[in-house]
Image (cartoon, rainbow, N blue to C red):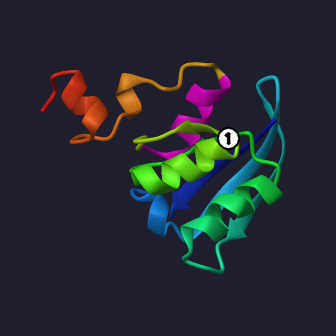
Amino acid sequence: MKVAVTIWENRISPVADSAGEVLVLDIEGQKVQELHRERFKNDSLFYRAKKLVDLGVKTFICGAISNFYGGLVEGYGIRLIPFVHGQLDDVLDAFMHKSLPNPEFVMRGSFRDAMRGNI
């Protein structure tokens, strides 16, 4: 299964709509078989969503994301795990152990955080 994660330095990028690159991982079971970075060459959200499709991505993990971009991603049949924050390795470990989404990695101040009564 291919998973894309927005990245900034060694963390989940805080805003998917403006993330400059994604890390694309090919995961089997709980092991990463292959990974590479892909840069977005265009700021268009249509381009970004289609790029994920062209890469064969099935799950997209990101920080904050606009309703518009999130709708495009989900409209292509890609599973969206939004409003995630944290160190890349920690988030990927949680994902591979099927514990994502996880309250530990929910962005503070996000709608999901508000729904849990934490802000």
Label 1 crowd (10 A; few <14 / some 14-19 / many >=20)? many
Q: Secondary structure at mark 1?
A: loop
Q: From this viewpoint, is residue 14 visible? A: yes
Q: Find residue 26 and report its horizontal and vertical position in percent.
A: 82, 42
Residue shown at 81% from the left, 56% from the top: 55
Q: Which residue does the numbered mark 1 point to in the structure image?
A: 78
Q: Is residue 90 left or right of residue 98?
A: left
Q: Find residue 94 and report its horizontal and vertical position in percent.
A: 56, 27
Kind of residue sitting beneath label 1: Ile
Provide the residue span drawn in magenta: 86-96
Q: Is residue 45 left or right of residue 86?
A: right
Q: With respect to residue 18, does 85 lie above or below?
A: above
Q: Is residue 89 left or right of residue 112?
A: right
Q: Find residue 91 and report its horizontal and vertical position in percent.
A: 53, 36
Residue 60 vs residue 70, the one in the foreground? 70
Give the quarter of the figure containing the N terminus.
Answer: top right
Q: With respect to residue 55, does 59 lie above or below?
A: above
In reply to whether residue 73 is colored magenta, the answer given is: no
In reply to whether residue 93 is colored magenta, the answer given is: yes
Residue 61 image-quadrant placement: top right
Q: With respect to residue 68, does 90 lie above or below?
A: above
Q: Is residue 33 left or right of residue 37?
A: right
Q: From this viewpoint, is residue 12 visible? A: no
Residue 16 vs residue 103, the one in the foreground? 16
